[in-house]
């Protein structure tokens, strides 16, 4: 299940829908609008294998890693969020739900930095 934080622009959500990428939105279909980041984590653990995409850098924290979800900080321009979500979902390292679980990632122009449960240090990969 893909979950988009409420801070993703509507135009980017429309683009994802046009590409037939299905998702749910925080504050609309999941949780209430304005839910605090730390209060969203228990909710994510109750969902079936969610991957949360956010423009909020607060989600890029190794101490928020959990094996039952994936957190992704989109460290890109707001108007390019959909492009990088699609790029992340097609990357061989992250293309399946199972591969994403336990990951906290930061997406940026040149690639992805991430932590994964069971590993001591962060890794970086390029596109």
Image (cartoon, helix red, strand yellow):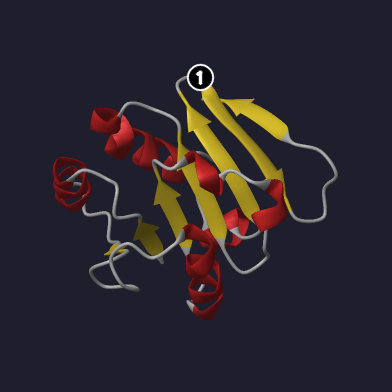
Task: Please name the residue shown 14% across and 48% down the image.
Answer: 14
Residue in front for this viewpoint, 8 or 102? 8
* Neighbours of disc 1 within 10 Å: few (<14), some (14-19), many (20+): few
Q: Which residue is mark 1?
A: 110
- Judged from this view, the residue extending furthest toward the bottom is 46
Is residue 57 toward the left or the right of residue 123 in the image? left
Q: Where is residue 120, by image quadrant?
A: top right
Q: Residue at x 27, y 54 (%)?
A: 21
Q: As displayed, is residue 50 above or below residue 62?
A: below
Position of residue 113 measured from the top left corner of the image (x, y, whole percent): 62, 32
Residue 41 is left or right of residue 117, and the answer is left
Q: Residue furthest right?
A: 120
- Residue 7, given in percent of the width and then of the height, sits at 29, 48
Dot 1 falls on a residue whose secondary structure is loop
Q: Is residue 93 visible?
A: no
Residue located 45% across and 56% down the image: 52
Looking at the rendered image, the quarter that the N terminus falls into is: bottom left
**Quarter residue 32 falls in:** bottom left
Q: Residue furthest top?
A: 110
Q: How far across and how far down the image is residue 51, in percent?
A: 47, 58
Location of residue 102 with respect to 46 vertically, above or below:
above
Relative horizontal placement of residue 61, taking residue 107 as reference (left or right): right
- Residue 127, image x and y in percent? 51, 25
């Amino acid at each position: 299940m893909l979950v988009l934080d409420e801070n993703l622009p509507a135009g980017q959500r429309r683009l994802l829908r046009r590409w037939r990428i299905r998702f749910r939105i925080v504050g609309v279909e999941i949780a209430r609008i304005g839910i605090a980041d730390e209060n969203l984590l228990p909710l994510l653990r109750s969902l079936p294998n969610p991957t949360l995409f956010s423009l909020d850098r607060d989600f890029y924290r190794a101490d928020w890693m959990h094996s039952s979800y994936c957190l992704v900080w989109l460290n890109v321009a707001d108007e390019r969020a959909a492009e990088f979500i699609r790029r992340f979902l097609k990357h061989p390292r992250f293309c399946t739900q199972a591969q994403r679980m336990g990951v906290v990632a930061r997406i940026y122009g040149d690639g992805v930095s991430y932590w994964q449960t069971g590993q001591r240090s962060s890794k970086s990969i390029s596109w």
